[in-house]
Every structure is written in structure tokens, then in C-alpha cells.
Amino acid sequence: MTDHDVIVLGGGPGGYAAALYGASAGLRVALVEENKVGGTCLHRGCIPAKALLQAAEVFRTVGHADAFGIRLPAAAAAADWPALNTRKNGVVQQLYAGLTGLLRRRKVTVIEGHGRITADGAVEVNGQATSARAVIICSGSAPRSLPGMEIDGDRIINSDHATNSDAASLPERVAAAGGAAGWRPAHRPRPRCRQYPRQGAHPPGNRHPRRRPGQPARADRWRPPGLVRD
């Protein structure tokens, strides 16, 4: 007899969504995550970046308040970087608490540690093996450097550093190389920025189509057998 019906390796958006989906279908689900559930999106990517983007939007709106017929004191608006980080961290923590509570209520077993699949098909975490009828791999992603530009966390940083910076102030100029995670932090109030997209990437504002020719609509896409919607 197996310990679980499904083991999910990785607690990011793909992993925790799969775990909750399986749990809602009555399956015994274990979720293996070596850091915090929520993954890059919640802790180092989408959520902190969008919290900072919202702050940048407010900053720009205040700077053009007179265009809306609102008069402000003569002093120019200034960004308080530590205060922005405090708010961003609060947003992340609130969503993290909600996610962990949801997993607990759905009775998803969260196993902390680095999981690997053994030769016999079991999953080993922290030296202990656990088994399941199926294993879903949602290992996520990690930032990569460019040749000749080694990331030092100070002058050359990646998206993880950009969304979790403990610096007292923002730099005057920023060059961003990459796609969405690369250019989002460049909109923070208000360094001068030049973006260098990676080769073959879609430039900002030029979104690729939602569906490729021949791709089925969402409702017609394949679903794992035996799993149904609530």
C-alpha cells in the first residue's frame, strides 16, 4: 500500500495548484517543498514585483496630480524605498498565510525538504522515503546569468535580488536584460532604465496570442483521468 495517492515535487503555483486540485477530488496528496510554498511567484517574482509596480503607478499618478485637477504641496513626491519594501513584504506574508491555511484545510501534507525520485519510484526527502501511485514534478525555475556577467548581488543582480532588496535607496540608472521578471522591477519609482530583451523574447507590451493556432480552448484541454472539477 502506498503512503499517498499523489506526491507533488515543488510548491510553486504549478505544484500547489496540482495539490489542491487532487485534494478536492478526494486524493491523499503530499506536497514537497524545500523553501516556502508559493515558490518564486509568491516570494520572489510575480507578487512582490506587482506590489512594487503598484507603488510605481501611485508615484506616477501623484507626479501628475495637477492633470487631474488636484493641487499638492510644492515639494516633489519622493519614494521611501524601505517603506515600499515593508508594504510589499506585508502583501507577500498575507498571501503566504492564506495559502498555507488553504493547504491545511484541504488536508494536503506539506513535507519540507528537497525531494528526489529513487530508482524504485519512491520519493526520498531528507533521507526518508515515501511512496505514491503518481508523482507530479513541478520543479519551477531559477534565474540564470549571462556569459561574462557573473551575478554578485550588488552591481549585477537577478530578479530575486531586485524584488527582495534591502538597500536603503534605488540606483539612479538600471539596465534590465530579460523578459517579464527582468523588466518589471525596472518600473519602480524611479530609476532611469534601458531594457535589453533576450534573443527571441516578446518585447514588453507585445503580448503573444493567448492561444496558438490549433490549440484547444481551456475547457477542452486534457485533464488527468479520474479528477473532476468541484
Image (tube, rainbow, N blue to C red):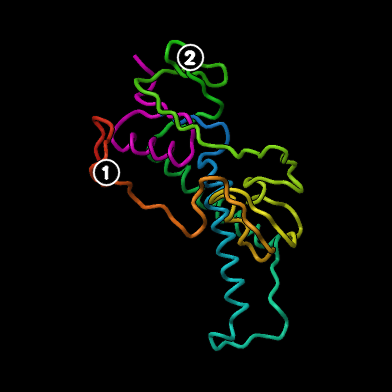
Residue ID for mark 1: 214
134 vs 227: above or below: above
Task: Tell me where the magenta segment starts and ends, as one range.
Answer: 1-29
Residue nearer the viewer, 122 or 150: 150
Q: Is residue 175 left or right of residue 132?
A: right
Q: Where residue 23 appears, x then y in whole percent?
A: 34, 35
Q: Is residue 170 left or right of residue 35?
A: right
Q: Earlier in the sequence, mark 1 or mark 2?
A: 2
Q: From mark 1 to mark 2, how far is it between C-alphas? A: 38 Å
Residue nearer the viewer, 76 or 199: 199
Which quarter of the rendered picture does the N terminus lie within? top left
Instruction: Using a 10 Å C-alpha cutoff, classify the residue at mark 2 as few (fewer than 14 neighbours), some (14 to 19) or many (20 or more).
Output: few
Amino acid type at image mark 2: Thr
Q: Where residue 31 appears, x then y in whole percent?
A: 45, 31
Instruction: Using a 10 Å C-alpha cutoff, classify the residue at mark 1 as few (fewer than 14 neighbours), some (14 to 19) or many (20 or more).
Output: few
- Residue 196 forms part of the magenta stretch: no
Q: Secondary structure at mark 2?
A: loop
Q: Where residue 93 appears, x then y in whole percent?
A: 56, 50
Q: Secondary structure at mark 1?
A: loop
Residue ID for mark 2: 118
Q: Where residue 198 appears, x then y in whole percent?
A: 57, 46
Q: What residue do we see at 26% from left, 43% from top?
A: 214
Q: What residue do we see at 62% from left, 71% from top?
A: 59
Q: Residue furthest front?
A: 199
Q: What residue do we see at 68% from left, 76% from top?
A: 77
Q: What residue do we see at 58% from left, 37% from top?
A: 142
Which quarter of the rendered picture does the C terminus lie within? top left
- Residue 12 forms part of the magenta stretch: yes
Quadrant hosting residue 147: top right
Amino acid type at image mark 1: Gly
206 vs 71: above or below: above
